[in-house]
Structure formats: C-alpha cells, structure tokens
C-alpha cells in the first residue's frame, strides 16, 4: 500500500465467496472468513480512500475450475445442480477475471468498498424447485 500511496493511488481487489453473503450449515469457519474479507474490504476502503486507493471485493459464484470438478460428473450433472439458479450454469473463470480487470481499471474510478457478486444470480434468492 505504501507504493500505491507514493504513486498517487491504485486499486486493491479482494476475493470473498457467496458464503460471505449467507450462512451455511457445517461451514462456519469458511463462512466467517469470507464475511471477514468483506468487512476488511470496507474498513480498508475507508482508511485508504484519502490516498486515492480503492478497495473492493469480488464475490464469485459457482465457477468451473479444478476445485469444482467432481469425478465422474457429466455436463448434465452440473446442469442439474446449477441449472436451478437464474442464469442456469456455472461461470467460466474468465467471467470472474473480467470483473477483476474492471475493478483494477480506471473505468471503476468511483468504486470503493463495494461487494461485486459475479454469481449468475445465486445470491438473489433460493433456486427454483
């Protein structure tokens, strides 16, 4: 942060999770850590704003990565689980990256302390039955 202060500002992008927006059974430590990142982001945005340093948090939803691969699952299996949410699919990693690029760019010059879900609508409510 000192380098950003000396150079007249910058952008910090943190990562949380959908579990940082709601509770979930048997995930208390993970959920608490993701809520904590959101709180840290907001507090840091207040503290660093006077130095023109913006601090935001990206909140990815279900994303197709090595971490979310399930042995033996087909595309139909993923669709069965994630097709219930508004956009009906998991994100590509590039879709999360696009938000990070935006928040790191001058295009987001008036954005700080914000939560930016990139979740295909997972956080808007419970899925379709």
Image: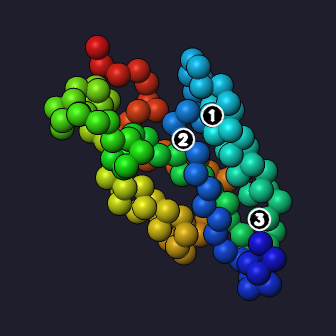
Image side of residue 124 versus residue 50, left or right? left
Cα separation, mark 2 vs mark 1, equals 9 Å
Q: Quadrant of residue 30?
A: top right
Residue 43 to residue 111: above or below: above
- Give yes or no for contact between labels 2 and 1 (Cβ–Cβ under 8 Å): yes
Mark 3 Cα-neighbour bin, 10 Å: few <14, some 14–19, many ≥20? some
Q: Position of residue 3 (x, y in %)?
A: 76, 81
- Label 1 element class: helix
Image side of residue 33 versus residue 5, left or right? left
User: Which sits earlier in the primary sequence, circle 2 or circle 3?
Assistant: 2
Q: Nearer the viewer, residue 99 or 67?
A: 67
Tag shown at residue 17: 2
Tag shown at residue 50: none
Residue ID for mark 1: 30
Q: Nearer the viewer, residue 68 or 79?
A: 68
Residue at the spot x=54%, y=41% of the render?
Answer: 17
- Label 3 element class: helix
Residue at the spot x=29%, y=14% of the render?
Answer: 129
Image side of residue 110 versus residue 8, left or right? left
Mark 2 Cα-neighbour bin, 10 Å: few <14, some 14–19, many ≥20? many
Q: Is residue 87 visible?
A: no
Residue ID for mark 3: 49
- Give yes or no for contact between labels 1 and 3 (Cβ–Cβ under 8 Å): no
């Amino acid at each position: 942060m000192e380098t950003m202060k000396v150079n007249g500002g910058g952008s910090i992008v943190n990562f949380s999770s959908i579990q940082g927006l709601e509770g979930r059974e048997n995930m208390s430590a993970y959920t608490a850590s993701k809520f904590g990142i959101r709180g840290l982001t907001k507090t840091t945005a207040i503290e660093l704003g006077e130095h023109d340093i913006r601090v935001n948090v990206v909140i990815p939803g279900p994303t197709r990565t090595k971490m979310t691969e399930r042995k033996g699952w087909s595309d139909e299996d993923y669709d069965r689980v994630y097709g219930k949410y508004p956009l009906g699919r998991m994100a590509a990693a590039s879709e999360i990256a696009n938000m990070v690029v935006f928040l790191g760019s001058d295009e987001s010059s008036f954005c700080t302390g914000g939560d930016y879900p990139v979740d295909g609508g997972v956080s808007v409510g419970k899925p379709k039955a």
